[in-house]
Amino acid sequence: MIRLSNIEKRFGELTVLKSVSVTVAEGRVTALIGPSGGGKSTLLRCINLLEIPTAGTVRIGEEELAFKPGGKPGWKDIQRLRGQTGMVFQNFQLFPHRTAVENVMEGLVTVQKWPAEKAREHAMALLHKVGMAHKAEAWPATLSGGQQQRVAIARALAPSPRVLLCDEPTSALDPELSGEVVEVLGTLAAEGTTMVMATHDLRLASRIAHEVVFLDGGEVVETGPSRELFTRPARERTQRFIATLT
Ligand code: ADP
Ligand code: MG
């Protein structure tokens, strides 16, 4: 479903990603783990092209785009790839002046030009899925962090993306509230949603990730099935990092 080949990302002199290659099969969940500054968020942003890779190839489903230093991809091509993805952020980033259901509808109405009524129906079905239908008319500020994140997940799913990208989806939540977000993501994973998530949350990663990629210093140090990588990491750098998580 996703194939990242030799992705390099530079910010001026600083190389943040060094020839990163990651493949995610349809219906699988990959967790990106690693120390702060290791490049997890940048890699996620290179998948939905919020950052343009300096070099390498991004493929999502049937859509593929190659990047070269100095080359500039067309806006249409970027939109085509970005349209395959939905993104969930650490700090929810809901529109504060829109109700929960309006947050979920927004992109469908403004970008995809759906009629409001049809968008509302679809949004309600998604709110139901994340257990937030009863708060459809609530303002984001009146919702707990866990509830806001569940609305944000519904919003990310609204255009039916091929892949859901999550950047530290539980990091802003205390353990009690992160549990409900883990539950929702777990349900989506069980339904076969393809996901890539950056996380420090061992509970989240070990519960729902099939594969784990350990990223340190902009490089993939180790990758493997989550059970193996968490219990028997091959590399010493991975072992040391996992010890800090528990
Ligand atoms: P992580 O999510 O693993 O903590 P990031 O992808 O956020 O790591 O950051 C990786 C590195 O890239 C860091 O050194 C960070 O300072 C740098 N970086 C990220 N975004 C930018 C940017 N827009 N401009 C310059 N440097 C950046
Ligand atoms: Mg990050």
Image (spheres, grey):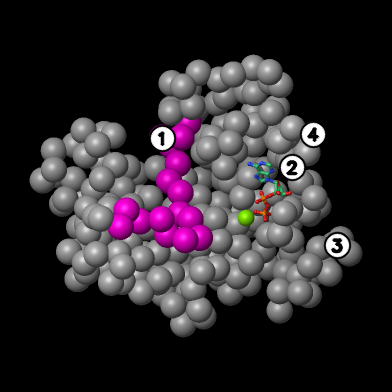
Is ligand 1 within 8 Å of the beta carbon of the residue shown at mark 2?
A: yes
Query: Alpha-carbon distance for marks 3 and 4?
Result: 25 Å
Mark 3 vs 4, N-terminal side: 4
Task: Decide: is 163 above or below 133.
Answer: above
Residue 160 painted magenta: no
Q: Judge depth for marks 1 and 4 and give the one in front.
A: 4
Give the residue number, with chain letter if any, for mark 1: 83
Bounds of the magenta segment: 81-96
Q: Residue at x 47, y 45 (%)?
A: 163
How many marks do you count on the picture? 4
Tell me whether the residue at label 3 lies in contact with that at label 1, contact meaning CB atoms closer than 8 angstroms: no
Query: Alpha-carbon distance for marks 3 and 1?
Result: 36 Å
Tell me whether the residue at label 1 lies in contact with that at label 4, contact meaning CB atoms closer than 8 angstroms: no
Query: Alpha-carbon distance for marks 1 and 2?
Result: 25 Å
Q: Judge depth for marks 3 and 2 and give the one in front.
A: 2
Q: Judge depth for marks 2 and 4 and give the one in front.
A: 4
Query: Alpha-carbon distance for marks 1 and 4?
Result: 30 Å
In the rendering, which numbered label is found on residue 13? 4
Q: Nearer the viewer, residue 183 or 154?
A: 154
The outermost residue toward the left is: 117
Give the residue number, with chain letter if any, for mark 3: 237
Q: Residue at x 13, y 43 (%)?
A: 116
